[in-house]
Image (cartoon, rainbow, N blue to C red):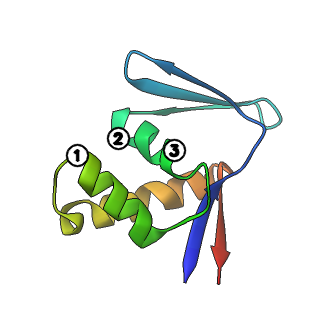
Amino acid sequence: MTSYIQKGGYEVMEIDSEWVILNSHAYTVTTLNEVGGYCWKVIENKKTLAEIIKAVAAYYNTEAEMVEGDIQHFLNKLIDCGLVEKYAS
């Protein structure tokens, strides 16, 4: 099973329901909307994709199937940006 977790060492700010992540080592700034910010908080500790989807679906009172593809795409983008690590169990 695959798990995801934030990489550490970033400056993170929440401003008007948007999140800003500053990676001073790579000189990048990544912005997240409200849902992305919630996902970011969820993966402070290692979580599986199913756990992340379940948490987001419950928080936003929707069906897991409705958010699954978006969450997977979002996590892949964060991995591409170097903000999230993926672990295979």
Instruction: From the image, tell me which residue sits under label 2.
Output: 35
Label 2–label 1 contact, CB within 8 A:
yes
Classify 10 Å Cα crowding around label 3: few (below 14), some (14-19), many (20 and above): many
- In the displayed structure, would residue 18 be above or below residue 51? above
- As shown in the figure, which amino acid type bears the numbered disc 2? Val
At 26% across and 60% down in the image, what residue appears?
67
Q: Position of residue 76 (x, y in %)?
A: 52, 61
Residue for point 49% across, 28% down = 19
Q: Is residue 47 left or right of residue 32?
A: right
What SS does tag 3 mark? helix
Residue carrying label 3 = 40
Q: Residue at x 42, y 61 (%)?
A: 52
**Which of the marked residues, 3 or 2, is nearer the chain's N terminus?**
2
Left or right of 56, for residue 28: right
Q: CA distance from mark 2 to mark 1?
A: 9 Å
User: Would you name the residue on which mark 1 appears?
Assistant: 60
Where is residue 79 shown, x and y percent of the image? 61, 57
- Residue at the farthest top position: 16
SS category of the residue bearing label 1: loop
Q: Is residue 86 left or right of residue 66?
A: right
